[in-house]
Image (cartoon, coloured by chain):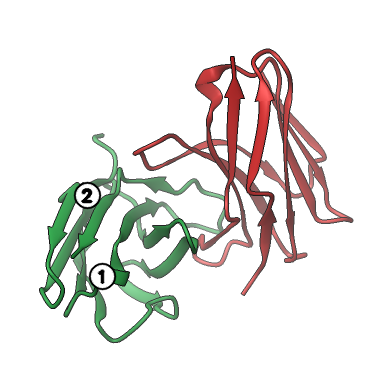
Chain colours: A green, B red
Amino acid sequence: DAGVIQSPRHEVTEMGQEVTLRCKPISGHNSLFWYRQTMMRGLELLIYFNNNVPIDDSGMPEDRFSAKMPNASFSTLKIQPSEPRDSAVYFCASSFSTSGGNEQFFGPGTRLTVL
Amino acid sequence: GEDVEQSLFLSVREGDSSVINCTYTDSSSTYLYWYKQEPGAGLQLLTYIFSNMDMKQDQRLTVLLNKKDKHLSLRIADTQTGDSAIYFCAESSGNFNKFYFGSGTKLNVKP
């Protein structure tokens, strides 16, 4: 398996533009997580899905952020409109969740810069 | 939410042992993990320990768990320059496999 795939790897955009980050989880995994990493705030969980259903989106910072998982092999994180303070590395992770204790596999991340 | 705390930095000399510490608050934690993040990369699982264990050893890595004090440590023996990275502690109580991560400890290994 290729692991968790994220695209793009780097994104530079201007303030006010819409940004869409994409994630393909590992085949067979049923849980998907979106994280954001910054120097100031460390690693933050934004939202996670189980069986394509959003379970907890309390980490989403504002209404400008939205995430979808239309099927088991694809998820998007959208920021509209983007702001400079959204600049961060965004990670997607997936796991096979039963009663817990299963490794989360992380993608390589998308480095977002909003000018 | 649950709190997982780590010191931010650790500096050691090559060949020495490194000990990275972590404390957590959730007494129902089932699994505790150590992840490693190299520059420009995602997090990779190093090792994990089930909450009914006190110790786990895997080659140069030793994990110690003091459940009473909610304290987890990772010892790296014979630390190498390639061990320089950020190390994250995480705990999970099994709820949809949601993890709570610490802030990460940046390990700097000096030659």
Residue occupying the point 73% across, 65% down:
B28
Q: Position of residue B13 (x, y in %)?
A: 67, 19
Residue lying at the far bottom of the rendered structure: A63
Q: Position of residue B52 (x, y in %)?
A: 79, 47
How many C-alpha atoms fall within 10 Å of the one at disc 1: few (<14), some, or many (≥20)? some
For the point 75% across and 40% down, the residue is B73
Farthest-out residue, front: A115
Element type at mark 2: strand
Q: Where, quadrant-wise, is the C terminus of chain B in this rendering?
A: top right
- Circle 2: is it few (<14), some (14-19), or many (20+) Cα within 10 Å? many
In this picture, is A50 found above or below B89? Answer: below
**Which amino acid lies under the numbered mark 1 shown in the image of this protein?**
Pro
- Which numbered disc covers residue A84? 1
Mark with earlier residue (2, 1): 2
The N terminus of chain B appears in which quarter of the rendering? bottom right
Viewer-side label of 2, 1: 1
Chain under callout 2: A
Using the rendered image, report if marks 2 and 1 lie on a common chain: yes
The one of B43 and B28 positioned closer to us in this rendering: B43
Residue at image location 34% in from the left, 39% down from the top: B40
Q: Which residue is mark 2?
A: A6
